[in-house]
Image (cartoon, helix red, strand yellow):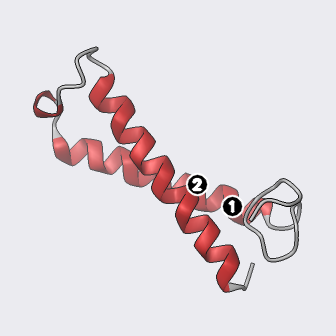
């Protein structure tokens, strides 16, 4: 958990989680209309998803390969 590789992987997963959350919120009305959603709460929810992703990476550290933020063996 104290390696650069771990934190790069964790940051990658967190950014993907945040992006997926924004896409989910924007697409929730069925039209993917970015202008109809309030941006501040949307960014807040996306940031929350990123934090949860980082916490998941931290608790996965003892399970996966050494230095990896993935819970699966071989996941970098």
Image spot of residue 7 (x, y percent): 62, 75
Task: Look at the numbered disc 2 and give the secondary structure of its residue.
Answer: helix
Question: How many numbered callouts?
Answer: 2
* Numbered label attached to residue 40: none
Residue neighbourhood size for the residue with mark 2, other residues' Cα within 10 Å, grouped as few (<14), some (14–19), many (≥20):
many
- Cα–Cα span, label 2 and label 1: 6 Å
Above or below residue 69? Residue 6 is below
Image spot of residue 65 (x, y percent): 88, 67
Q: Which residue is mark 2?
A: 53
Question: Which residue is painted at 43% across and 50% down in the image?
Answer: 18
The quarter of the image holding the N terminus is: bottom right
Image-based side of 66 in relation to 46, left or right: right
Above or below residue 60? Residue 27 is above
Q: Which residue is mark 1?
A: 57
Task: Look at the numbered disc 1 and give the secondary structure of its residue.
Answer: helix
Q: Residue furthest left?
A: 35
Residue neighbourhood size for the residue with mark 1, other residues' Cα within 10 Å, grouped as few (<14), some (14–19), many (≥20):
many
Pointers 2 and 1 in contact (C-beta within 8 Å): yes
Image-based side of 33 in relation to 56, left or right: left
The quarter of the image holding the C terminus is: bottom right
Above or below residue 42? Residue 76 is below
Image spot of residue 33 (x, y percent): 17, 26
Q: Residue furthest top?
A: 30
């Amino acid at each position: 958990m104290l390696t650069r590789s771990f934190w790069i992987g964790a940051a990658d997963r967190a950014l993907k989680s945040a992006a997926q959350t924004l896409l989910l919120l924007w697409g929730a009305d069925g039209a993917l209309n970015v202008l109809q959603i309030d941006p501040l709460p949307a960014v807040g929810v996306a940031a929350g998803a990123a934090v949860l992703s980082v916490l998941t990476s931290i608790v996965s550290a003892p399970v996966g390969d050494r230095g990896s933020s993935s819970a699966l063996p071989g996941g970098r």
